[in-house]
Image (spheres, rainbow, N blue to C red):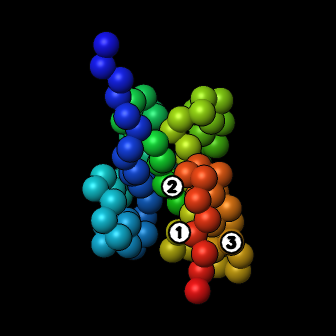
Amino acid sequence: MSSVQRNKIVSIGDEETSLGFKLSGISQVFTEEPKKAAPILRSLSEDPEIAIIIITEEVAKTNRDLINRIQINPYPVIVEVPGKKAKYESAEDRVRVLIKMALGIDMEAE
């Protein structure tokens, strides 16, 4: 019996945020309007290789019910990040805490 290892990180968001994730090396990046992201989010949540789905706050807000259903399971971990319309006051700290919860490592800012 073959066990699939969850080792993929994917993202869904606006064009600017998606470009940033592409440049950071995330292999699967989906640029999608929040109202049209549900089918992609559903499909990604069922992929046994995906550990983390990074989504913008706009996508999360529009798809909150679906996200709540996905988060009942331990995987994939859904991390919400600010998109192009977000306020960046404490976004870095919030993302850092979520990454620590998901991966068990602290991403210290220097």
Q: CA distance from mark 1 to mark 3?
A: 15 Å
Residue 29 at x, y percent in the picture: 33, 56
Residue occupying the far right of the picture: 90
Q: Nearer the viewer, mark 1 or mark 3?
A: 3
Whether residue 9 sits left or right of residue 96 in the image: it is left
In the foreground, 26 or 6: 6
| Residue that mark 3 sits on | 93
Q: Nearer the viewer, mark 2 or mark 3?
A: 3
Label 1: how many Cα within 10 Å (few below 14, some 14–19, many 20+): some
Q: Quadrant of the N terminus?
A: top left
- Secondary structure beneath disc 2? strand
Whether residue 81 sits left or right of residue 16 in the image: it is right
Dot placed on the residue nearer the N-terminal end, 2 or 3? 2
Three-letter amino acid code at disc 3?
Asp
Q: In the rendering, which numbered label is found on residue 55?
A: 2
| Residue that mark 1 sits on | 83
Three-letter amino acid code at disc 1?
Gly
Q: Would residue 45 be seen by someone viewing this image from the given angle?
A: yes
The residue at 37%/34% (across/down) is 5
Q: Quadrant of the C terminus?
A: bottom right
Residue 70 at x, y percent in the picture: 58, 33
Residue occupying the far top of the picture: 1
In the foreground, 5 or 53: 5
Q: CA distance from mark 2 to mark 3?
A: 16 Å
